[in-house]
Image: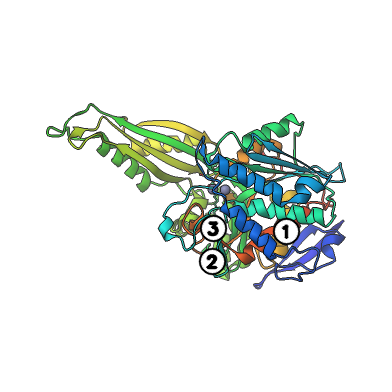
Amino acid sequence: MLRMVRLTLTEDVEAVVLIVRTVHLSQRPAQTSQCRQTDSDFIPLNEERLQRFQKALGFESVSRDSGDSNTDEIFKFGEFIIASFPHIHRHSPLVTWERVNNLSLLYHIQGNDPSLKPYLLMAHIDVVPVTNLDQWDAPPFSGEVKDGFIYGRGTIDDKNNVMGILEATEFMLSSNIKPKRSFYISFGHDEETRGNAGASQVANLLRQKGVKEVEFIVDEGMTVLEGIIDGVAGPVASVGVTEKGIVLLNLSVELPPGHSSMPPRETAIGILARAVLRLEENPHPSMLGAGVETDMFESLVPKMSYLQRVVISNIWLFRYPLSWLLSRKPSTNAVIRTVTAVTIFNSGVKFNMIPPLAEAKVNHRVHPSQTIQEVVDYDRAVINDPRVKIEVVYSMEPHPVAGHGESDFGYQVLRTSVRQIWPEAVVVPAIMVGNTDTFNFLNFSTNVYRFSPTHMFPGDPERFHGINERMSVKNYEQVINFFYHLIRNADQAGLSPVHSAHPDL
Ligand SMILES: CCCCCCCCCCCCCCCC(=O)N[C@@H](Cc1ccccc1)C(=O)O
Ligand SMILES: [Zn+2]
Ligand SMILES: [Zn+2]
């Protein structure tokens, strides 16, 4: 059934949101994680659940490079998951699950209404290696709680989502709640290396099983941001409705070697250094006004001052000053343009030899309003030196844009679930600035949403793959409850899914 529900924002604006709610949702007010501990619609973070998360963080399930990972630890983490959630793995007749390629996991939870198209929840069980060990406030594989924060590699990327999805599903099954809509869960084991042994094999298996389409997909991604977008107060739940493309370039300069006592005017190192400097000094142009980032800023209007609203409502007019403002921070700069990172630079054999070869790796994350070819052409023009060879090592075009309107079912399920956990949040469509293994599943749905229920404040984005990765105890409870609400909300069949066709598919 369709109902109009009024959700009040903390500031001066009220958003009237058209959403579908059945009795399950409409009988009670929006909840936060502080609501009644006895409520069957709320999963409290008791000692047992907290300890399970801490134990999960103890596995050093590290992926370093393609084919180079701690497979023993990844396997043990899988064993731990299987042993820790008895309803999912043993008791419930609704669940079938299997290991895929020994280390990844695939689940199917049978709903009782076969007319509803299933959906897919994704996360990954591997983590990136730890660096700067001496600067961590708690050991990275300890799961130690300090001042209300759980510390550890994987607390925000991506064991929070793995364990949150499992806790929510286990709670539902142990409470004897039967979902109406079937869903799949995929836990890949090589996301961090863009490998083809994990999610890629899960996708193949799903295809072999005859699954052609799912209603929507939710994978890790953008987060709940607070104090991170300048001038916007309160939490902003940014949902990645598209994903930047990626291109890895190898730049190389080859020149004859020789004795350093009789050097040529320029060396391979000098030529290559100038090329990468030119790339850094000539960033790709701001695409503000060309795509999803415009929808994002427009959706932020309810959280803005009068002056900001005037600017955002006239992006075409304020494009240049706004781009300048957003470019000042790496996190907002990433939203408006293709970014350039020179990540590897190698050269030199011996101190008194003219180097025969200099090589650099340049990693671009490509704005959805550009193509890989445009990016490479731009670089070639900026470098403007035929001695610098430019090769594409790997590339993936930006992803299609998922529906994010009032009638897009998956988006509305996410939006409703976010607002139940963060009633004061504004939910905005966004560009996912990193990449994940989601790309393996693009053929299954146009409705792919990249969102992690991680509440981030200034300084937190740097914890992704960084030092002192952590999540507050309160936030982990919100993670579990977000997924629980999402699973329950996906059962609401009243809103017939209407998809905005995307020309890219
Ligand atoms: C508006 C302000 C925006 C603030 C942004 C703050 C939140 C940022 C969230 C970023 C999430 C990035 C996580 C990406 C996961 C990851 O590390 N992937 C890796 C590995 C990979 C590469 C290519 C293909 C697949 C996998 C990567 O992106 O390099
Ligand atoms: Zn991740
Ligand atoms: Zn990662």
The reply to whether residue 429 is in sight is no
What's the residue type where badge 3 is placed?
A: Ser
Q: Which residue is mark 3?
A: 142
Which label was assigned to residue 227? Answer: 2
352, 218: nearer the viewer: 352
State how many labels appear.
3
441, 63: nearer the viewer: 63
State yes or no: Cβ of the residue under disc 1 lies below 8 Å from any atom of ligand 1.
no
- Is residue 88 placed above or below 423 in the rendered structure? above
Label 1, label 3: how far apart the Cα atoms are: 31 Å
Q: Residues within 10 Å of mark 1 (few under 14, many from 20)?
A: many
What's the residue type where badge 2 is placed?
A: Gly
Q: In the displayed structure, does residue 378 sit left or right of residue 87? A: left
Q: Residues within 10 Å of mark 2 (few under 14, many from 20)?
A: some
- Is residue 395 placed above or below 26 in the rendered structure? above
Q: Residue reaching furthest left?
A: 261
Q: Quadrant of residue 36?
A: bottom right
**Residue 393, horizontal then vertical, whole percent:** 45, 32
What's the residue type where badge 1 is placed?
A: Ser
Which label was assigned to residue 417? Answer: 1
State yes or no: Cβ of the residue under disc 2 lies below 8 Å from any atom of ligand 1.
no
